[in-house]
Image: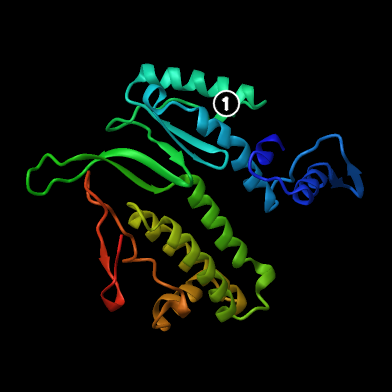
Amino acid sequence: MQAIEERVVDQSVLRLLRQILRAGVMQEGQVRREVTGAAQGGPLSPLLCNIYLHRLDREWDVREHGVLVRFADDLLVMCKSAQQAQAALARLRQLLAELGLEPKEAKTRIVGLEEGGPGFDFLGFHHQMVRSRGYRTGRGTVFLARWPADKAMRHARDQIRALTVRSRLLLSPEAVVQDINMFLRGWMTYFKYGHSAARFAKISDFATVRLAIFVGKRHKRGRRFGLNVVAYLSPDRCGLISMSGIVVPPRANKPWRERPHAGGERRR
């Protein structure tokens, strides 16, 4: 509330926020108020998180401890050396302790970005140093590539699996395909900026197989029958959208390409 009061002076808004923070939680029909705070998953939670952690952003010294990149409660610090990374981690622990917080140890580590190294996950993407193929020189260029992380891939498979479960057999294939397409459009729009083509192909194949299993069960036949319907008898895989050709990969160590759009407009 002190952080909010630095900008907001409207007493009615502040009173409402205090009531929300003291509302407690409902568990098994009983209201518990032992713990105060915004409910996780609520629309107000990420906003209050950003307001509170903005103090971390203000106190951070980029020149001394590296570049801090933060999205809500997920953060990454880019350093020039292992020594600077150690100092940055110590400084991060100190600043968080002043806010009554501490980093989650299972997800906190120092990663050396080098060719062949393990890389790291951030905001759903896996980032890793790789070498380009180098058709002309034969040596290639080392650059930072990114693609959907393993966790993001599992989430996509789980969502597609949930949309094609046996309990939805009363729905038409068209309705199921519409739900799958809605999920895939959002997922692809987020992950298309990077080197995601190979992983897009895997999710596309998985969606095709799951739809084939659904069609086979709906007709009380096997997977082979469903694959025949989806992949061969249907000209457009029963309306399932294509995931090929939409990835926007950057060039190694160069600015992002600008793509022409309708009406002559160009966007980065």
Q: Amino acid at mark 1?
A: Glu
In this view, 152 is above or below 159: above
In the image, 127: left or right of 157?
left
In this view, 15 is above or below 85: below
- Report the residue that reaches farthest toward the left: 137
Residue 208 locus on image (x, y percent) = 46, 68
Residue 202 locus on image (x, y percent) = 41, 58
Q: Nearer the viewer, residue 266 or 33?
A: 266
In this view, 1 is above or below 243: above
Quadrant (top left, top right, bottom left, bottom right) of the N terminus:
top right
Q: How many marks?
A: 1
Q: Residue at x 50, y 71 (%)?
A: 181
In the image, 22: left or right of 84?
right
Residue 218 locus on image (x, y percent) = 61, 77
Q: Residue at x 79, y 51 (%)?
A: 12
In this view, 219 is above or below 193: below
Q: Residue at x 68, y 78 (%)?
A: 170
Q: Nearer the viewer, residue 8 or 126?
A: 8
Per the image, the residue denoted by label 1 is 105
Quadrant (top left, top right, bottom left, bottom right) of the C terminus:
bottom left
Which secondary structure, mark 1?
Answer: helix
Q: Nearer the viewer, residue 11 or 246?
A: 11
Please name the colour scheme applied to the rendered image. rainbow
Which quarter of the picture shows residue 257? bottom left
In the image, 262: left or right of 56?
left
Residue 28 locus on image (x, y percent) = 89, 47
Q: Residue at x 17, y 46 (%)?
A: 133
Answer few, some or many: residues within 10 Å of disc 1's Cα (few below 14, many 20 plus, some between 14 and 19): few
Q: Nearer the viewer, residue 214 or 50?
A: 50
Which quarter of the picture shows residue 31? top right
- Report the residue that reaches farthest toward the front: 9
